[in-house]
Image: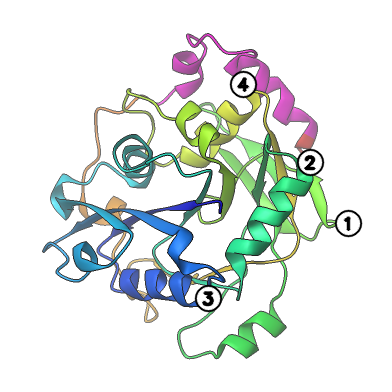
């Protein structure tokens, strides 16, 4: 039976355990789901190291190097040969039988496909039946602007088909082969807030197609994290930790790889998606 490795980087998130429990409960075959967790918090988690199938890394939150770095760290340190990988945030919920649905879909689309889509919102007080019925589809990202360092800014839109090529993955909903997870790791301290662009670039470099998937299998909590917001429930690393020493221009670094295509070619490829 195919195994799935779930990558979760968490910064001071009180919903982390709930996210893992929900993934287990909603899986059709929970014993085939394994978790790699990198938690940056004030205290080490006492629950997760005891949970079956959870592999756990801890750092004090002041030592955080940003979400992108810790997702990369998880694939380097905790991945153990699982056939498929899912990257999600630490405040997510799952559709029933999500594991079977993702595996069947990627086998139909081809193992060099990377499935993604910006997941719909759920709120903590809402029931499963409510948010899955009210918000059943992912959002497609249309590029509006590309910055000097290739940060993609976009606007959400519906896609005309169940599947469509897309320029950038969602860090809170990316399903790929385990083999790709190892192609996409890096040793350099690349821009920790551009991991979506970095992974998308490497997908192109190694001949993988990033596809938007319309049907939602993951829901994400989009509470307002702006400083001073009444809805705020957790801090962001950018508000508390001064991240420094990382490489802004990841394209220059990735161009040194011996890959079928270059990172520079990716920067040209994504222009066709720009509005």
The mark nearer the N terminus, 4 or 2, is 4
Q: Tell me whether circle 4 and circle 3 mark residues in contact (CB < 8 Å).
A: no
Residue tagged 1: 160
Q: Which residue is drawn at 55% across and 91% down?
A: 127
Residue tagged 3: 26
Which numbered disc covers residue 275?
2
Q: Where is residue 48 in the image (x, y as percent from the top left)?
A: 24, 66
Q: In this view, does 259 lie above or below 16?
A: above
Please indicate, yes or no, whether residue 141 appears anywhere in the rendered image.
no
The mark nearer the N terminus, 4 or 1, is 1
Q: Where is residue 143 in the image (x, y as percent from the top left)?
A: 70, 42
Q: Give the range drawn in magenta.
A: 248-272
Q: What is the secondary structure assignment of the residue under circle 2?
A: loop
Q: Tell me whether circle 1 and circle 2 mark residues in contact (CB < 8 Å).
A: no
Which numbered disc, 4 or 3, marks the residue closer to the eye? 3
* Real-space CA distance between mark 4 and mark 2, rounded to the nearest whole angstrom: 23 Å
Q: In this view, does 219 lie to the left or right of 236?
A: right
Q: What is the secondary structure assignment of the residue under circle 4?
A: helix
The mark nearer the N terminus, 1 or 3, is 3
Q: What is the secondary structure assignment of the residue under circle 1?
A: loop
Residue nearer the viewer, 150 or 92: 92
Q: Is residue 43 left or right of residue 19?
A: left
Q: What is the secondary structure assignment of the residue under circle 3?
A: helix
Which numbered disc covers residue 205?
4
């Amino acid at each position: 039976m195919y195994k799935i490795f779930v990558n979760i980087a968490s910064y001071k998130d009180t919903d982390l355990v709930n996210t893992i429990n929900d993934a287990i409960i909603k899986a059709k075959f929970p014993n085939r789901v394994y978790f790699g967790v990198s938690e940056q918090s004030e205290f080490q988690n006492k629950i997760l190291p005891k949970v079956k199938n959870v592999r756990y890394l801890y750092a004090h939150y002041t030592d955080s190097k940003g979400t992108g770095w810790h997702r990369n760290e998880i694939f380097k340190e905790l991945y153990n040969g699982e056939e498929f990988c899912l990257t999600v945030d630490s405040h997510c919920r799952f559709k029933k039988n999500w594991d079977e649905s993702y595996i069947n879909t990627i086998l139909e689309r081809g193992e060099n496909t990377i499935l993604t889509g910006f997941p719909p919102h759920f709120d903590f007080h809402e029931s499963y039946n409510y948010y899955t019925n009210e918000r059943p589809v992912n959002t497609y990202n249309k590029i509006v602007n590309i910055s000097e360092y290739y940060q993609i800014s976009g606007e959400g839109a519906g896609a005309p088909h169940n599947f469509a090529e897309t320029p950038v993955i969602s860090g809170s909903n990316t399903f790929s082969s385990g083999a790709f997870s190892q192609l996409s790791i890096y040793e350099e301290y690349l821009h920790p807030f551009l991991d979506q662009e970095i992974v998308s670039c490497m997908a192109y470099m190694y001949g993988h197609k990033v596809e938007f998937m319309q049907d939602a299998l993951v829901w994400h909590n989009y509470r307002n994290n702006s400083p001073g917001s009444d809805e705020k429930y957790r801090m962001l690393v950018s508000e508390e930790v001064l991240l420094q020493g990382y490489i802004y221009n990841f394209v220059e670094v990735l161009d040194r790889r011996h890959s079928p295509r270059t990172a520079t070619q990716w920067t040209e490829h994504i222009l066709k998606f720009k509005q």
